[in-house]
Amino acid sequence: MNKVIDKLAWVLIQDGKFLVVRSQGKALFYLPGGKREAGESDIEALTREIKEELSVDLIPNSINYMETFTAQADGKAEGISVKLTCYFADYSGDLIPAAEIEEQKFIDSNDENLCSIAALAVLKWLEEKSLIGGKLT
């Protein structure tokens, strides 16, 4: 049975790296964000999730759709995939991990081994678009 976990994700790029987070008890990093609640728009849900996870406010008029990715869900049975609808956005406040988030870090192509499958798909896309730093060839 194919099941899709529908999630929203925030892509924040600084100095050629992008922001990923790790939940308590997990080994791999993924993109900050989460699921919509009933009746929420993408922007409302993403803004709420980012506030919960990283203590910052996304600036509504800066939120721009980036791309949608689908990949095998990390730590789930085969055939369960995650669909990440990704947005760029500016923010106000200080990035401070909260709720279930244990760690945040900015990564580039040299950090592939830290990423969940879905985060890796986003990393590759950003690299192809030259939005983040890559490996030296």
Image (spheres, rainbow, N blue to C red):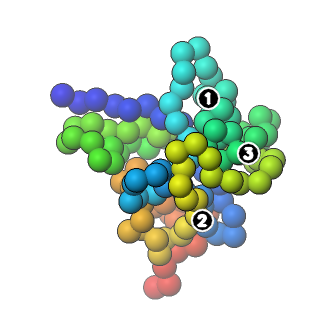
Q: Nearer the viewer, mark 3 or mark 2?
A: 3
Query: Percent position (x, y) of residue 86?
Result: 55, 42
- Asked if 137 appears above or below 2 in the picture, the reply is below
Q: Furthest-bottom residue in view? A: 137
Q: Nearer the viewer, residue 60 or 132?
A: 60
Q: Earlier in the sequence, mark 3 or mark 1?
A: 1
Q: Position of residue 79 (x, y in %)?
A: 22, 38
Q: Nearer the viewer, mark 3 or mark 1?
A: 3
Residue type highlighted by circle 2: Phe
Q: How far apart are the alpha carbons under marks 3 and 2?
A: 16 Å
**Residue matched to label 1:** 45
Dot 1 amino acid type: Ala
Residue at image position (32%, 39%) is 81
- Cα distance, mark 3 to mark 1? 14 Å
Query: Number of numbered discs present?
Result: 3
> From the image, which quarter does the N terminus lie in?
top left
Please report whichever mark, 2 or 1, sits nearer to the chain's N-terminal start: 1
Residue 42 in the figure: left or right of residue 35:
right
Task: Tell me: 71 left or right of 39.
Answer: left
Element marked by disc 2: strand
Q: From the viewer's perspective, is residue 135 above or below residue 11? A: below
Please tell me whether mark 1 sits on a helix, a strand or a loop: helix
Q: Which residue is mark 2?
A: 106
Q: CA distance from mark 2 to mark 1?
A: 23 Å
Residue 65 relative to residue 22: left or right? right
Dot 3 falls on a residue whose secondary structure is loop
* Residue sitting at x 58%, y 42%: 99
| Residue at image location 66% in from the left, 59% down from the top | 13
The disc labelled 3 sits on which kind of residue? Val
Residue 56 circle label = 3
Q: Is tag 3's residue or tag 2's residue first in the polypeptide sequence?
A: 3
Q: Position of residue 127 (x, y in %)?
A: 52, 65
